[in-house]
Image: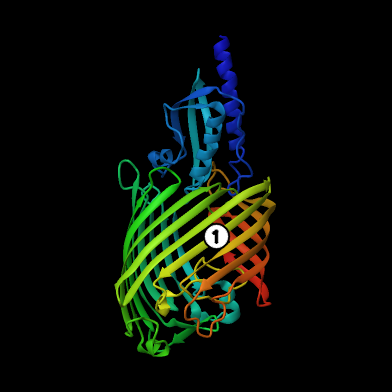
Amino acid sequence: MLRDIKYQLWLVCIIAGCLSVKAQEANLILPEKDSASVTGSSMDCFIGKITVVGNKKTKENIILREIPFRPGETYPLNVLAEKFEDARRQLMNTALFHSVVVAAESFESATVHIIITVKERWYLFPVPYLKPVDRNLNQWIIQQKARIDRVEYGGKLYYYNTTGRNDKLKFQFIDGYSRQFSISYDRLYIDKKMKWGLKLGFAAGRHREFNYNTIDDKQAFFKDPDNYTSRFLNSYVNLTYRRAIRTTHSFGIGYSKTKLADTIIVLNPNFYNNGTNTIRIPGVYYSMAHYNLDYNAYPTKGYAAELGFAKRGFNKDFDSWEFNAKGFGAWHLSPRTFLSTAIYGGIKLPFNQPFVNKRFLGYGDVFLHGYEYYVADGVAGGYLKLSLNRELFDFKIRIPPIKKGKESTYIPFRFVGKVFGNTGYVHNPEPGNNTLSNRMLYSGGIGLDIISFYDLVFKIEWSFNQLGENGLFLHRKSIF
């Protein structure tokens, strides 16, 4: 009798810890703190049955693959409480669910039966597409005067969790500034042991305007009003390997073919090494990604790292060995204040690369705040970013259910203020008339991040650079 009472007391502690996790169910974006754990306890708990509810589309084995415990395992009480929170966080980071609750359902002596309750997202998104082609909104609005002819339009179909196995099918058709079609499929697991995955994709299209050079640290474009200036075809196949939960390895092969208008080669004879207007580039790739974050879309705690290697081209027309590394870390200074840092480094060998392979800083997610209007071409370099962030306030907007008996939907909004500083460097053996390469670059500023439904992160930033310039800049999510 006393023995049973003892177990019940310990399991009440577990349930209390789980209820603190359940209280976070409505907090869809940023968990404020880890669920409560019981310290100083050496009581061992045996995991019994694990039940999953709420998964109408997602296969149960996909959910169980993400949790850090299995039936039959034994853990001290405080460790099990921590694993409950790890499981909730990992399942939320799959981007499959609005909310996840991991709790003790019942107990039999020292055996704990666990229930995982999920609320699935909407997975099918047929959406119209309208987007400026420039590297960021500021470049399109300020430098290009919001020209309509620099906008792409069309349609996209995103089908996430296509078969219930956390796979993704994407179709895209675009017209306007460019005309292109693309299709891709990403399946997380293709084997019974759920370790190997597959990614493949194909894209083809043509551009009316083309970036043929960099002049005074800004992109220079050529446009032919009567003809397309370039045609391209890209394809790839990747195998992924994920032995545990947080680390993924990717092995791939790819092929690209690009044909340019003759005028582009006249304007920049160094665009390709071979002096012709057509180039074919086969390649092999390897990458490793490790994520241990509280919320991948907008982390406030944890760390992440990515390493990449690529061999592109195998003859004198194009020959490049490429290495890059990214790192991110975030640490709480108080429940609502956290410090974050991001670092990036890359190199392309040999250094005598053609212009087309010298794009470095200012392209994609490799950029410095305050230099959004510029690019820095080169073959080696990197940056360091620091940010002090403070959660200011949050609220939710209730959307009534369409049908009676259904639950209301809540759209959360969270606002985070920040101050930040950046430094970076790019090495370019042949800078020409560009001055941002081969020198240390610095910038800083203040900003407001807005986090909402479906991992939407929008950033409003006022940045300053060492050129004496400042301004308001807009960005979407990027942890690096």
Q: Which residue is mark 1?
A: 343
For the N terminus, the quadrant is: top right
| Front one among 60 and 323 | 323
Indicate the quadrant where residue 238 lies.
bottom left
Which scheme is used to colour this image of the protein?
rainbow
Counting other residues with Cα less than 10 Å from the Cα at mark 1, is it few (<14), some (14-19), or many (20 or more)?
some
Element under disc 1: strand
Q: Position of residue 260 (x, y in %)?
A: 36, 83
| Front one among 338 and 35 | 338
Indicate the quadrant where residue 195 lies.
top left
Q: Position of residue 448 (x, y in %)?
A: 66, 61
Asked whether residue 95 appears in the rendered view, the answer is no
Q: Image height check: is 329 above or below 152?
A: above
Q: Position of residue 375 (x, y in %)?
A: 53, 76
Asked whether, in this view, residue 191 is left or right of residue 333, the answer is: left
Kind of residue indicated by mark 1: Ile
Query: In the displayed image of the protein, which residue is found farthest to the left?
Result: 315
Q: Image height check: is 343 above or below 112?
A: below
Indicate the quadrant where residue 298 lies.
bottom right
For the C terminus, the quadrant is: bottom right
Q: Position of residue 259 (x, y in %)?
A: 33, 80
Q: Image height check: is 231 above or below 324?
A: below
Instruction: Report the residue at 41% width, 44% height from top.
Output: 58
Instruction: Report the residue at 41% width, 42% height from top.
Output: 244
